[in-house]
Image: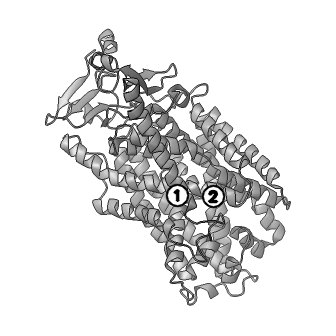
Amino acid sequence: MASPTLTEKGSSTPPDLEMTSGHNADLGVPEFYIDGKVNFVGELGGNGAQATIQDVSGAPVESVNPLGYSVGWWSALFLNITMLIGTGIFSFPSSLLKSLGSVGLTLLYWPIGLAISLAGISVYLEFASYFPSRSGAEVVYLEQAFRKPKYFFPVAFAVQTVILSFVSSNVIVVAEYIFRMTDHTPTDWQSKGVGIAALTIILLPIWFSTTWSLRLSNIFGVAKIITLLLIIIPGLAAFGGHFKQVPEPKANFQNAFEGTRNNGYSLSNALVNIIFSYGGYTNSFNMANEIKNPIRTIKRTANTAVIFVAILYILTNIAYFAVLTKEEIRGSTQVTATLFWSKLFGEKAAMGLTILPVLSAASNILNSTVGHTRMIREIGRQGVLPYPKFWVTTKPFGTPTGALIAVWVVSFIIVIAPPAGTAFNFIVAIQNYPSSLFLALMTFGLFIVRRDRKRLNLPQPEYRSWTVVVLFFLAANLFLIIMPWVPPEGGISNSSFGFFYGASSLTGLGIVFLCALYFVLWSNIFPKLGGYQLRQVVFTLPDGSVSHKLIKINNDEVDIWDAKHDPSGRSLRDFEERA
């Protein structure tokens, strides 16, 4: 077997790296590109995609993915649909109408959210085209866009992702819906107990089988579509005058923009909520290396999912406004969907139909966990977390066991530890700001990736986004960063958690700052004091998982160590023995 190949800047691209399927002739032999500023390595995965050519500090490509290739066209489609249709559509129209004031503007905001989502898919698709055999989405894209300081973004993103890897808000929603169906008012501990039980039951299929968790995702996706159709169809029938319970179904659409508010905070906050309502359209990107021909598949399924769901969202809102008055929607203290069904079919029927929002919340836990565990596992493969074998292993069932344990433990703590109400709302709100910050940085980083690849004369990606679309998506994410600092109406303490409105954003920034402090200590100060340098090595677990691990090399042994390893951390002796 040949030794790893080094390609200097300006040389032609080896034909092997333009293959769209299979592996190169020298299986397992990486191709390196070096121009004095960056060291890139090219490797083929087993998902039929073009070669992944990335900075050598990136987690190694798994030519045979131990998680398998279970994600087909339908699974990729429903990974996004099931995440897109969250619990918000069943209650969010009430708060949106309160913020915007008019039916007309409320309906206009949903197409704006669609446009931003389509731009986001375009940005993610270009990133995925550069690194098609890496799962984890943002984990990979930030790692590759911001390579200096070395390991900084992997460390920062890793720590905040693990710390904030909880699905607690949906857990509590599931418990609340279940008790609402039984017409029982639970205590805090009853809600928490039912929530933890639901979390455990939902996570078990993800641990036992990727195939079955994807099948459940598909089933939940169909159930969500049916749920929205059970709002849309009766609503349109009411709009046509077929329900005597609704004497004036067109009243809300006459002078539709009457009452529109001109308060900047309310209008902006509503747009923020709309953008988050479309969150989930990137879920399939988290599993790119489990999808055959990922770019072609995701391009079709992600765009189809978000357009389809946007149509359902708009029709659902029209149905709400056809059946319910503006006053009923604004004053609703319960789920808007429940109020809708109650008005058309009666209280008992509405209570029975509440099982559908329960399934919706449960499916969000399942789908977000499926995608999030891939992110956490990819973080583990970067080597920046301690005990990389724990994070990377797929034993015993061929699923990301360590990542699943992390999600369950963190979610358990967040559900159990804080009291219900404002404290819990505050903890959930902390998630949003770091996510928005990293998403904006990732979008800007696309220009850095383009520059580096052009300098190295690397192959064109399978998909390239229009620059104006990237800038539009970047502007949307900058908006998400800026708006949380605008004071709300009613004073600076008028927040969902009952105290200073900027506290959650400051806490989120504080977590990022602590990550930076840890990085400086771990990568700079401790090595200087200890007389060593960090080096990455590639190791393979018995299950086939391939990962980086960072080790300490004494300063007087660094030159010898570097001479015996290629730039990505593989032992040159291994290649010689296999030749």
For the N terminus, the image quarter is top left
Q: Secondary structure at mark 2?
A: helix
Going by the numbered disc 1, the residue's amino acid type is Leu
Task: Determine which residue is flagged by label 2.
Answer: 426
Q: Where in the figure is residue 377, as x and y percent of width and height?
A: 51, 35
Q: Where in the figure is residue 196, as x and y percent of width and height?
A: 74, 45
Tell me which residue sits at (78%, 55%) in the image: 178
**186 in relation to 514, above or below:** below
- Quarter of the view holding residue 8: top left
Going by the numbered disc 2, the residue's amino acid type is Phe
Question: Can residue 345 be seen in the rendering of this structure?
Answer: yes
Q: Residues within 10 Å of mark 1 (few under 14, many from 20)?
A: some
Q: Where in the figure is residue 64, as x and y percent of width and height?
A: 43, 27
On screen, residue 523 versus residue 394, left or right, reads left
**379 in relation to 560, above or below:** below
Kindly report which numbered mark, 1 or 2, lies closer to the viewer in this rendering: 1
